[in-house]
Amino acid sequence: MVPPAGSSLDLVARVAVIGSGPAGAYAAEALVRLGDATVDVLDRLPTPFGLVRHGVAPDHPKTQSIRAALAEIFQLPGVHFLGNVAVGEDVTLDELRAAYDAVVVAFGAAVDRRMDVPGEDLPGSASATEFVEWYTGHPDIPPQRFELDARTVMVVGAGNVAGDVARMLARTEEELRDTDVPPEVLAAFARSQVRDIHLVARRGPAQARFTTRELRELGELTDADVLVDPADLDLDPVSERAVADLPAARRNLDVLRGWA
C-alpha cells in the first residue's frame, strides 16, 4: 500500500487498488468492510478477476465458483471496477497518490518465469503463461497464435499449470464445448493434430507439485491414455524420505504407479 506523504491510513476514505485479481479484490473487500472507505479497482484489461479469468483452466467447474465469489465483491457498496486503465500510461502512480488517500498495488502474478535455456525463444516454444492466456481468451493473445499443428508436444514442469496445459491439449472438442474457451480457440482445438504429449520435469515424482486431484484428472480424459515409464518412478534416498514425510507426495506416487 502506498499512502501519500504525511497521511494516516486511519483517515483513509478513498483508495485506489491497482489490479483486479484475487489479491486486489480481497483487498477492496477488506477495506470497505473494515471502515468507511470507497475503493476504485483499476485494471488495464476490460474485465476483472486477473488470473482467475486468464490463469485457471476453463474446463474446471470450480473456476466458475471462484469467479462468482469475486464478482460478489465488485457488487459491494463502495467498490467500483475501472477497466482499460493502464497505470503508467493512462495515469501515473503520482497522479493516483494525489487523487486518493492510499494506493494498493496488487498485480504482477502473471509474469513469466523464464528457464534461461538454449532454444527457449525458438519458433514452436512458448511459455505456459502465453498458452494459458490463449485458451482463456486474454486480449493480448490473438486467437490464431497457436495452430496446434504439431503431432508431439513437450510440456516442461510438474505442477498444476503443466497438468492444466497437458489436459487441455488432450481434451476432445466435445469435452471443451461447454467451457468458456473462446469459439476461435475451440475451433483450433477441434483441428488439433497433437497426438503425443510428454510431461518432462527436472526432478522426480516425490518433488512433483501436482495436487492429487488435478493429477488424477489426467487419467479421466475420454480419449487419452496416460503412460508412465516405471524407471521414472525409482526413488533415491532423498526422494524416499520426502515420500515418507509428505502425504501428498505419497498420494501422487500411488497415482503415477497406477499408470506405470
Image (spheres, rainbow, N blue to C red):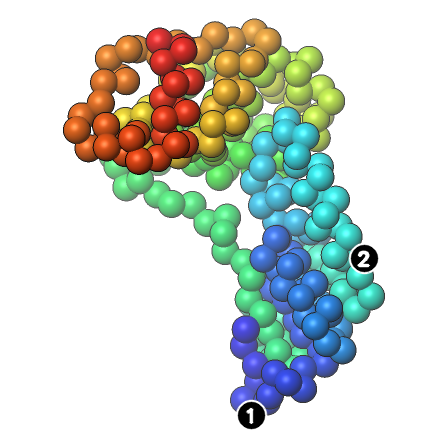
**Numbered badge on residue 75:** 2
Q: Residues within 10 Å of mark 2 (few under 14, many from 20)?
A: few
Residue 208 picture location, percent across and down: 35, 31
- In the image, 129: left or right of 205? right
Q: Residue at x 66, y 16 (%)?
A: 175
Secondary element at tag 2: loop
Q: Amino acid at mark 2?
A: Gln
- In the image, 65: left or right of 119? right
The quarter of the image holding the C terminus is top left
Please indicate, yes or no, whether residue 89 appears anywhere in the rendered image.
no
Disc 1 from disc 2: Cα separation: 32 Å
The quadrant where residue 35 appears:
bottom right
Q: Nearer the viewer, residue 216 or 96?
A: 216
Q: Residue at x 23, y 32 (%)?
A: 241
Q: Amino acid at mark 1?
A: Gly
Q: Nearer the viewer, residue 44 or 162?
A: 162
Residue 66 picture location, percent across and down: 67, 43
Residue 137 picture location, percent across and down: 64, 36
The quarter of the image holding the N terminus is bottom right
**Numbered badge on residue 6:** 1
Residue 233 picture location, percent across and down: 28, 18
Q: Residues within 10 Å of mark 1 (few under 14, many from 20)?
A: few
